[in-house]
Image (tube, rainbow, N blue to C red):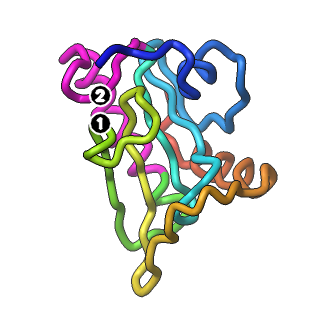
Amino acid sequence: MTYDDNNVFAKILRGELPCHKVYETDRVLAFMDVMPRGDGHVLVIPKAKARNILDVNPDDLAELAKAVQIVGKAAKTALSADGLTIQQFNEGAGGQVVFHIHFHVLPRFEGVALKPHSGQMEKPEILADFAAKIRAALPAA
């Protein structure tokens, strides 16, 4: 399979679609999932073109993993979460929907199940609030 330059994450990286940014470096971008499965659901992607874990450059994957850890710690702290779920899917049969490698960072709370992936979009002001809280919990640069 080849990389599709018109996937939604490629459009976000090019500035063609908006996002609620949480964290950014020269190699990665983290932003709020517009169809969250829980409060504070963040997506972390590389800026490099890569369809999934099977074709991503190992150096880009290493930077991506670092960003997942940084964002995960900040999200857990910001939302006083009890834990985290980190998810990553590969190809349609593996559950991947957007074909640009990404990790889901989901703050988790005791006794609260993840919402099903319904396609329901969250209100922008709620996403902005979560993004601001998580950004505030990031380590100083």
Residue 133: percent from left, percent from top: 64, 53
User: Mark 2: which secondary structure?
Assistant: loop
Is 67 on the left-hand or right-hand side of 121? left
Q: Residues within 10 Å of mark 2 (few under 14, many from 20)?
A: many
Q: Position of residue 122 (x, y in %)?
A: 71, 57
Looking at the rendering, the stretch of residues picked out in magenta corresponds to 48-74
Q: Is residue 8 within the magenta segment?
A: no
Q: Mark 2 or 1, which is nearer the eye?
A: 1
Magenta segment's dominant SS is helix
Q: Which label's residue is closer to the chain start, 2 or 1?
A: 2
The percent coordinates of residue 71 (x first, y second) are 44, 43
Give the residue pinned by disc 2.
52
Q: Quadrant of the N terminus?
A: top left
In the rendered view, tell whether residue 82 sits above or below residue 3. below
- Please, is residue 72 above or below residue 14 in the view? below
In the foreground, 123 or 55: 55
36, 84: nearer the viewer: 36
For the residues bearing labels 2 and 1, Cβ distance under 8 angstroms: yes
Q: Amino acid at mark 1?
A: Glu
Is residue 51 on the magenta stretch? yes
Q: Which residue is mark 1?
A: 91
Residue 19 lies in what quarter of the image? top right
